[in-house]
Image: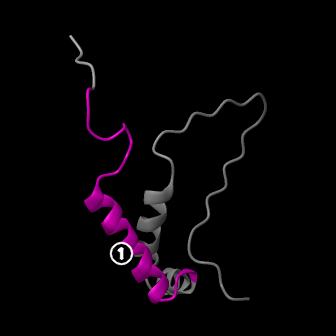
């Protein structure tokens, strides 16, 4: 039997430590250069950068297609050309 929620945070509300940590990470990101910093990481350590990308991709994806499907795999880091 499921109990009725009677108090506490609303569902989905991050706790104070999570919010504080997220703000600290954001502050540090902007202090080291933001997007420019990530470009530098992508160029110097593609493996680490790809790890970050993997964390930003959706965990569950559902695709409905009526026609042909083309998948393009991009490897490496684009050059500055």
Q: Is residue 76 magenta?
A: no
Query: Which SS class for mark 1?
Result: helix
The residue located at (61%, 64%) in the rendering is: 74
What is the image's colouring?
A: one colour
What residue occupies the far right of the structure in this picture? 67
Q: Is residue 11 left or right of residue 76?
A: left
Asked which quadrant contains residue 9, the reply is top left
Q: Quadrant of residue 20?
A: bottom left
Give the camera-side residue of 64 and 3: 3
Q: Position of residue 59 (x, y in %)?
A: 45, 44
Depth check: give the residue in front, 45 or 5. 5
Residue 27 in percent (x, y) is at 42, 79
* Residue beneath the point at 37% across and 46% down: 13
**Which quarter of the figure is the N terminus placed in?**
top left
- In the rendered image, residue 26 lying in the magenta stretch gets the answer yes
Range shown magenta: 6-35
Q: Which residue is mark 1?
A: 24
Q: How many marks?
A: 1
User: Is 57 situated left or right of 10 in this image?
Assistant: right
What is the crowding at mark 1: few (fewer than 14 residues within 10 Å), some, or many (at least 20)? few
The answer to whether residue 4 is above or below residue 36 is: above
Relative height, residue 80 to residue 48 (above, below): below
Q: Is residue 74 left or right of residue 53?
A: right
In the image, residue 9 above or below residue 27: above
The structure residue drawn at horizontal position 76% and vertical position 36%, both measured from the top left corner, is 68
Residue 35 drawn at (x, y percent): 56, 80
- Position of residue 42 in the picture relative to residue 67 (left or right): left
Closest to the observer, 12 or 57: 12
């Amino acid at each position: 039997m499921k109990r009725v929620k009677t108090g506490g945070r609303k569902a989905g509300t991050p706790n104070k430590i999570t919010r504080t940590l997220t703000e600290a990470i954001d502050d540090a990101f902007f202090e080291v250069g933001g997007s420019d910093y990530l470009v530098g990481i992508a160029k110097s350590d593609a493996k680490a950068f790809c790890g970050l990308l993997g964390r930003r991709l959706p965990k569950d994806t559902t695709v409905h297609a009526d026609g042909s499907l083309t998948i393009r795999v991009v490897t490496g880091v684009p050059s500055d050309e």
